[in-house]
Amino acid sequence: MILHVRMKYGPKWGSLVSASKPVIQSYFDNIKSKIDPASVEGKKLVISTLAPFIQRLVSKVEKTHWLTQLSAYLRTKEDALEADINSAKDDLGVYDTGLNRGPVVAVPITPNVDDKLGVDILGEALLSIIIKNPTLFTEKIKEINLGPLDLWITTVISRLAEEDLVNFSFDNFVKKFDGDGAMKLEFAYLRSQELWREFSDKDLLTEFINIIRRIKHRTVISKLASLEYEIKEAENEKNRDKVLELINRFTNLTKELTEINNV
């Protein structure tokens, strides 16, 4: 659609873009119904589409307004978003003279630093402690909140919870996994035996509690970061009731974080 409009107006495109705030709003409203703002591809598409318009805004107030809007919508920090917008190719410029009607180029987006890491370090540490001596965690394993953990770790811990851990046999347990899963589990088991070799049962329980606390801390921090963007979005929409509701949730999570830190 954007390419069709550029071709239609040709040399007049530059002057049209100078009044680009309503143009941005139009494209923004249109694209919101077609993409998933939580996906990397969705973020790329929004930035590649809107960046050239935002780059050409003269008013710092308007630029700040759009950075705030997009930050809330894409759940991405403003400084990272601004860097991506500034580095995006301004492929509108060639239409100031009606030349070289090239395609829209998607630009890479800087990953949100708050996104969950590909490797769940805390989750791996938790699994490592459990498989060092599963019998020790016969009851506690059933109380673990698996929601914040990596899918593979969740799968292993869920299956462990179904086992007779008093008479646990790792050799029998690993046979329930195929291919890469079995190899990954065997590696985790060998590493756990070496890593926690000199730890007593009491030490293992202490480490288990500490890691559970850190996972809870990470989860609350993630929720607070998400709420921050939701509050911005509600403020942009001038939805006072929603803002108050979100602030109340934010306050409760802050209290929960304090309790976790004081344990």
Image: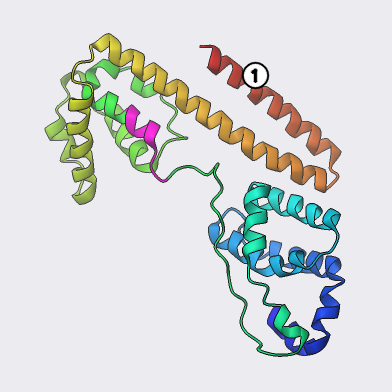
Where is residue 23? Give x, y as percent.
82, 70
Q: Nearer the viewer, residue 153 or 196?
A: 196
Residue labelled with disc 1: 255
Where is residue 137? Give x, y as percent.
29, 18
Where is residue 153? Give x, y as percent.
34, 37
Whether residue 224 is situated above or below residue 105 in the rendered picture = above
Residue 60: name its quadrant: bottom right
**Residue 121 drawn in magenta:** yes
Q: Nearer the viewer, residue 49 or 28?
A: 49
Q: Residue at x 24, y 22 (%)?
A: 134
Is residue 1 visible from the viewing direction of this image? no
Where is residue 169? Give x, y as percent.
14, 27
Chain part drawn in magenta: 118-126
Q: Residue at x 18, y 20 (%)?
A: 197
Whether residue 88 is situated above or below residue 73 in the rendered picture = below
Farthest left residue in view: 171
Graded by Cα atoms within 10 Å as few (under 14), some (14 to 19) or many (20 or more), the crowding at tag 1 reads few
Q: Amino acid at mark 1?
A: Lys
Residue 190: name its quadrant: top left
Q: Nearer the viewer, residue 92 or 128?
A: 92
